[in-house]
Amino acid sequence: MNRIALLSRHLAPSPASAIGGQNLLAGKVVLVTGAGSGLGRAVSLALAADGAAKIVLAGRRRDPLDATAAEIASLCGGSCETLVVPTDTTEEASVARLFEAIRAHGSGRLDVLFNNAGVGAPAVPMDELPVSEWRRVVDTNLTGVFLCTREAFRLMKAQTPRG
């Protein structure tokens, strides 16, 4: 069994998403970065299965995001909604466009941010790692997380009830 299938099985809907019979994701808007593949895709599907009202799918490539959205649509049978927003989380302007799309679509709120977009460096000795690769990893794994968290905080702070 591949890692994604195993993870998807592990993240399958469970009683953990409900407390006292109440679905914690009911009516919630969730943003998942890196949603087109890997962990981000698996988490997006699990959130849909667990009852999230809207899942915003962000990632660099539209086609994988569209495929994730189609799978969510078939999984939740119309009880949830997706918003696909191709985004480069390393670019401040791209992240700003992502959050403008969230504000403009539907309720304009955000309840959960799953900051998942990330990349790894090539498996080489440190003295052989080009600075450009190092910067790519730092920009994606640190700066991208910062940019998305900052915008999410701004949006959540301004909404009622707060996120």
Image (cartoon, rainbow, N blue to C red):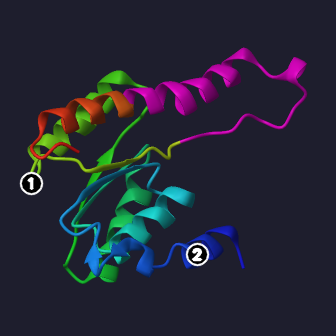
Given this view, does label 2 or label 1 mark the residue nearer the observer? Answer: 2
Residue at x-position 72% and y-position 79%:
1
Label 2 close to label 1 by CB (< 8 Å): no
Q: Disc 2 marks which residue?
A: 10
Quadrant for the C terminus in the image: top left
Range shown magenta: 118-147
Q: Nearer the viewer, residue 71 or 138?
A: 138
Q: Position of residue 72 (x, y in %)?
A: 34, 73
From the image, give the main secondary structure of the stretch colored magenta. Answer: helix
- Where residue 94 sits, quadrant-wise, is top left
Query: Disc 2 or 1, which lies upstream in sequence?
Result: 2
Residue at x-position 68% and y-position 38%:
120
Q: Position of residue 117 (x, y in %)?
A: 50, 43
Q: Disc 1 marks which residue?
A: 106
Query: Is 95 left or right of 107, judged from the image as shown?
Result: right
Q: Amino acid at mark 2?
A: His
Residue at x-position 17% and y-position 42%:
162
Q: Is residue 159 above or below residue 77?
A: above
Q: Amino acid at mark 1?
A: Gly
Query: Magenta segment: does it hold 63?
Result: no
SS at mark 1 in the image: loop
Furthest-front residue in view? 20
- Where residue 98 sits, quadrant-wise, is top left
Q: Dot 2, how many residues are within 10 Å of its Cα: few (below 14), some (14-19), or many (20+)? A: few
Total numbered badges shown on the rendered structure: 2
- Where residue 97 sits, quadrant-wise, is top left
Q: Dot 1, how many residues are within 10 Å of its Cα: few (below 14), some (14-19), or many (20+)? A: few
Query: Is 131 left or right of 22, judged from the image as shown?
Result: right
